[in-house]
Amino acid sequence: MRAHLLRRIALAVPTLLGVSLLVFLMAHAGGDPARAIAGEKAPREVIERVRREYGFDRPLLMQYGSYLRGVVKGDFGRSYQTGRRVSEDLSRHFPATVELATTALLIAAVIGVLAGILSALRPRSLLDASVMTGSLLGVSVPVFFLGMLLLVLFQGRLPGGGQLGFASDFTPDRTGFVLVDAFLARRSDVAGEYIAHLILPALALATIPLAVIARLTRAAMLEVLSSDFVRTARAKGLSTGAVVMKHALRNALVPIVTTVGLQYGTLLAGAVLTETVFSWPGIGRYVVESISRQDFIAMQGAILLIAATFVLVNLVVDLLYGWLDPRISRG
Amino acid sequence: MKRAICGAVLAVLAAGCGKPGDPGLKGGDTLIYARGADSKKLDPQAIEDGESVNVVTQVFDTLVAFEAKGTKVEPALALSWTASPDGRVWEFKLRQGVRFHDGSPFDAAAVVANFTRLVQAGAANRYGMGEPPYGFLYTIIEKVEAKGADAVAFTLTAANATFLTNLAMFPACISSPAAIEKWKQDYGQHPVGTGPFKFVSWEPNQKIVLEANPEYWGGAPKSKRLIFAVIADNAVRLQRLKAGEIHIMDGVSPSDLGNIRSDGNLKLLQAPGMNFSYLAINNDKPPFDRPEVRQAIARAIDKQELIKLAYSGVGQTGPNPLPPTIWGYNESIAEYTYDPEGAKKVLAEAGLAGKEIALYVMPNPRGYVPDPANVGAVLKQRLEAAGLKPRIMSPAWEGGVYLKELKEGKHDIALIGWMTDNGDPDNFLFTLLHSSGIPEQNHARYRSKEYDTLVEQAQIAPDPAKRAELYRKAQEVLRRDTPVVPLAYLPNLAATRANVAGYELHPMGLVRLKDAHLGP
């Protein structure tokens, strides 16, 4: 088990290095950061001076090297555009994304697994057909379209978009997670308002993973339900509930947990679109803002953080996997 | 696990002793202004984007300020001023008894510290600010010195008529030197000025909160608290204005005008602006080096149709490359008449019949052209009718590719525009068309000794009437040479809740919220 863990962690390092190099090169491939910093109306001499001041005239690999040295020490540099520390920005924006993605995942996992099980119990029934059609729609509808649709339908009826009402005086200054901080500060009004704001974007974000999870749960359950040990369990006279929950589900859980885990990573990345549509102040919007401002150092930090989270989530999934099915870690 | 999560959610919902809202404020005390993007920094010297400028305007003062509805300057932190006969030495008498929001006094030393920071390369109090993006406007300041506690003197390298107007611009805002020393590299997140509002807090990409400065020398603001909120999407912002969650929004899409006018809870603000969009014809590329060919391009375009189809019917047209709101605009110059047949003939004679030309159209909206794709489509059709074969080129605006290709002169004709910095005609006529602007802002690559001399003289003439006369002459030269074809001057637009009072649009696009408040 420990060797398995160490091997997985060791593999994460080159992955992250690769991501950081790729993002760095992509960021420097297009555009001219010196012009973006100096501004559209700046004369050429000023742009040249900025280029020297920021070291953009040095070879790319050297620039990458000094960036990496900083990152290792936890210093992601200062944003070219705002002058704020990127690490400070990330710690402000990341919690909002985590709260959004986690809520979306909860919605997707609970409804998805339930729908999948129900479908599998009555294959080819009307219920099954509607779950499968619904999930096909869920996978196919682009998030930005669905988000807009939700906004048009519910705007004004539900508070939508934005983290909290703008006039709110509450700042999440303990952990950065609004729900947690509201709980710590015993501010139920804030928590309630926050949840109300969270619902629409979380729903929009949840559709794709929900659909994927439902379809996969159905397939896994169908397979398990037709296996010999389930027939044996039934033959022993166990109730359907016991068969499904104790025997079948436990065995179908391995692929389901994997999918749910992997979906979490996808949710963090997919949040880019949802956050833009709903003005959600998370890491996804931060990435979009940084790109449109040519703020490469901010963009690099944010993408690196998303990648690291993705790798971490995968690692946790792998470990869970081993726990659910001991054969894997031994193998 | 699941039980633990449910428990936590319930506990949050049950934590019933929270006190809602801020105890000291009533609902009507807070005014919420929403825009499409966040500010970058709030250090007046380190910024250039409108979203930063709009917040800075509330927190800071300048020595002189633009008048409420125009571009003339009037006293602000300076009460009066005199210029030496040669126009090189300017002395300002300062307002006394003013304090910065941190309690430190505003005096001559503060003014000197601010301008040293602005113009002196490597000044000690820059603290990593880098090069001020608008510093180039102030490089004519040779030195600035205190004359006692309440007077300062500026010495310029040469007389320059735009010096005073540039002092009213945002880079010349006066910061608390003590606050700059305190926050150093982080001053951009902790601005301290003398303005009507004090900075309170900033949640990036979310909101900036300001509170009224009751001690303000110009009288206390009408709203106790002012919030600059970020709502990226124009349509969503309008939705939230309709829902009453915000009170003022900028970035109104011209296509939403009808929707706003028909909503009784909303009010549309519209005022002539100081921007324009135009076609920069590449004067270096034959046969566009000949004025009659360029004039034919102007005559091939139906500007009224263009305004209707591509500018949602808002905006004006005219023959001059500066908007009519700027003083010195020459009213007596005739607009080009739409004459497709005549234009076609001239263009054919110039060998352009059926010839492919590169028509540059930016891919995304700019303040002066809300729908460039449509402008491109209308232009293409009209130029085709005149016998040309325009090929639309739309390299990315972000990353500066579009401007880079213009600077390299790759265009035959390019759609481009300008928004005023300081409300001075110099900012259009010199910046965009003086030969020294090639290849930077002079995208038409227009070179004329006669024109250059006129706008150079206007730049140093001390008498405004004389300057206006020189600019009017310069516009006549432009009408004759037609290096560019002006397309449209757009109004400034904003929408507010119907009960917002005390807010008017400024022609320069300045956002001043001191008197804005929610009425009954």
Image (spheres, helix red, strand yellow):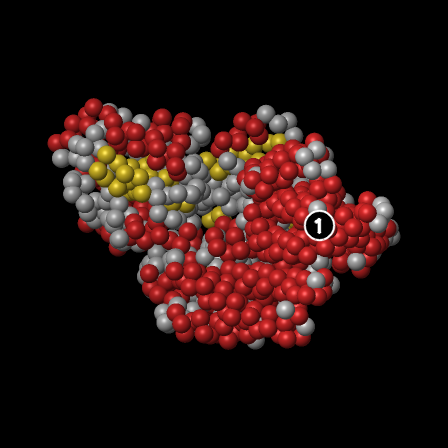
Q: Nearer the viewer, residue B350 or B427?
A: B350
User: Residue visible at 63% across and 69% down?
Assistant: A331
Q: Nearer the viewer, residue B383 or A14?
A: A14
Res. A322 image quadrant: bottom right
Res. B201 image quadrant: bottom right
Q: Is residue B135 above or below residue B314?
A: below
In what element is the residue under mark 1? loop
Pinpoint residue B267: horizontal percent, then vertical percent: 60, 32
Q: Nearer the viewer, residue A209 or B31?
A: A209
Pinpoint residue B444: horizontal percent, then vertical percent: 26, 46
The reply to whether residue B384 is in sight is yes
Q: Quadrant of the N terminus of chain B?
A: bottom right
Res. B183 image quadrant: bottom right
Near mark 1 (Cα within 10 A), the count class, few <14, some 14-19 or many ≥20, is few
Q: Is residue B319 above or below residue A298?
A: above
- In the picture, measured across the screen, residue A309 lies left or right of residue A235, that is left
User: Residue visible at 76% across and 48% down?
Assistant: A231
For label 1, the residue is A227
Numbered disc 1: what chain? A
User: Residue visible at 51% across and 56% down?
Assistant: A290
User: Residue visible at 85% across and 47% down?
Assistant: A237
